[in-house]
């Protein structure tokens, strides 16, 4: 009976691993193409003086995420940028969601809260199959989060990914995202509280004729306490908060620095130089890996693979180190970019 269970399970595991490897290879391939697109073609596809990217790409710009390159787009995680965004456009073309007036971006945001709560309920289950369903549901919630932004931009005739900072929709979307993530964390805590992981194996001595004798008998050690579960969950939750706060801050700053149109011609040239620089591309890539969305994807992957506790243990301290390093590098770059675009043009440079 066991052999029948091991065979299919092993095959499914190999299939999922192969799929994960293919997705990673696809992301690397798309990153390479994004780099080439930014450096070899104008950022504005309406520029008639040079060859535009939309004229050479074999994928229609209608669904090609590399056509309209913006600050927020290059700071998005790989899954949202390369998979969910094109899928949102395809579904919208089929269902005409943007043309349906009674479906508003805010109503989509409120709906994905319900999906997140249902997902959290599944993830809190003792059954691995239900937890995997919860993972799929939460990824669907993330797709809906992309959909509400897409609908809002289409109705306002905005090209590419952009954050309309300060608007009511911006804050409603942020609050709904926070509620959804909170529901996920609560579901995870309930699961770990009801199923506390073991600390590991210990070898217990046995008694032979009144004397202790060592054997190869191994048993599980004590269960991890609820206090440690709370510590691990809170530690990762704080990382999500730091990542989300910093990521949104840098989207706002870089949009103001690199996408302002009320600038002098020379300042606009320098904006393009910064956007096309390899160092800026490296910073955006670091944020694609460490932003709140990608951290959530990794968390969901660990739940799906039934490696949640191992994930929490491994990221507990490394996560803070990575986030603080990326934040420091970004802050330094922002100072340099401000100086490069504006101060040098105001007579503060001898160049």
Image (spheres, rainbow, N blue to C red):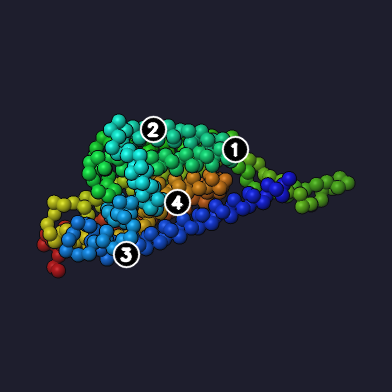
Q: Nearer the viewer, mark 4 or mark 1?
A: 1
Q: Quick one: label 1 or label 2, which is nearer the N terminus? A: 2
Q: Residue at x 37, y 63 (%)?
A: 32
- In the rendering, at what x and y percent does residue 244 appear? 36, 45
Q: Quick one: label 3 or label 2, which is nearer the N terminus? A: 3
* Mark 3 touches mark 2? (CB < 8 Å): no
Pointer 3 residue: 36
Q: Nearer the viewer, mark 2 or mark 4?
A: 2
Residue 226 visible in the picture: no
Q: CA distance from mark 2 to mark 4?
A: 31 Å
- In the rendering, at what x and y percent does residue 213 appear? 81, 51
Q: Residue at x 35, y 35 (%)?
A: 109
Tag shown at residue 319: 4
Q: CA distance from mark 1 to mark 2?
A: 26 Å
Dot 4 falls on a residue whose secondary structure is helix
* Mark 4 touches mark 3? (CB < 8 Å): no
């Amino acid at each position: 009976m066991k052999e029948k269970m091991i065979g299919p399970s092993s095959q499914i595991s190999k299939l999922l691993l192969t799929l994960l490897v293919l997705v990673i290879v696809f992301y690397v391939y798309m990153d390479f193409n994004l780099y080439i697109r930014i450096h070899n073609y104008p950022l504005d596809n309406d520029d008639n003086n040079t060859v535009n990217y939309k004229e050479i790409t074999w994928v229609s710009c209608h669904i090609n995420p590399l056509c309209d390159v913006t600050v927020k787009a290059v700071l998005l995680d790989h899954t949202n940028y390369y998979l969910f965004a094109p899928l949102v456009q395809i579904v919208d073309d089929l269902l005409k969601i943007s043309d349906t007036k009674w479906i508003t971006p805010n109503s989509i945001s409120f709906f994905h809260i319900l999906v997140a709560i249902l997902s959290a309920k599944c993830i809190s289950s003792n059954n691995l199959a239900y937890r995997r369903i919860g993972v799929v549901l939460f990824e669907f919630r993330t797709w809906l989060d992309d959909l509400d932004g897409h609908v809002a931009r289409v109705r306002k005739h905005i090209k590419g990914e952009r954050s309309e900072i300060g608007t009511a929709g911006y804050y409603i979307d942020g609050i709904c995202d926070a509620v959804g993530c909170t529901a996920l964390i609560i579901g995870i805590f309930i699961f770990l509280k009801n199923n506390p992981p073991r600390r590991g194996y210990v070898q217990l001595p046995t008694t032979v004729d009144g004397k202790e004798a060592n054997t190869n008998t191994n048993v599980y050690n004590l269960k991890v306490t609820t206090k440690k579960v709370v510590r691990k969950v809170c530690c990762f939750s704080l990382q999500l908060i730091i990542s989300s706060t910093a990521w949104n801050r840098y989207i706002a700053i870089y949009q103001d620095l690199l996408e302002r149109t009320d600038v002098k011609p020379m300042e606009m040239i320098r904006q393009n130089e910064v956007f096309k620089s390899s160092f800026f591309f490296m910073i955006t890539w670091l944020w694609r890996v460490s932003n709140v969305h990608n951290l959530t994807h990794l968390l969901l992957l660990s739940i799906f693979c039934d490696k949640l506790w191992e994930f929490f243990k491994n990221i507990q301290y490394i996560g803070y180190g990575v986030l603080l390093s990326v934040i420091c590098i970004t802050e330094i770059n922002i100072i340099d970019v401000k100086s490069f675009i504006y101060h040098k043009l105001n007579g503060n440079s001898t160049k």
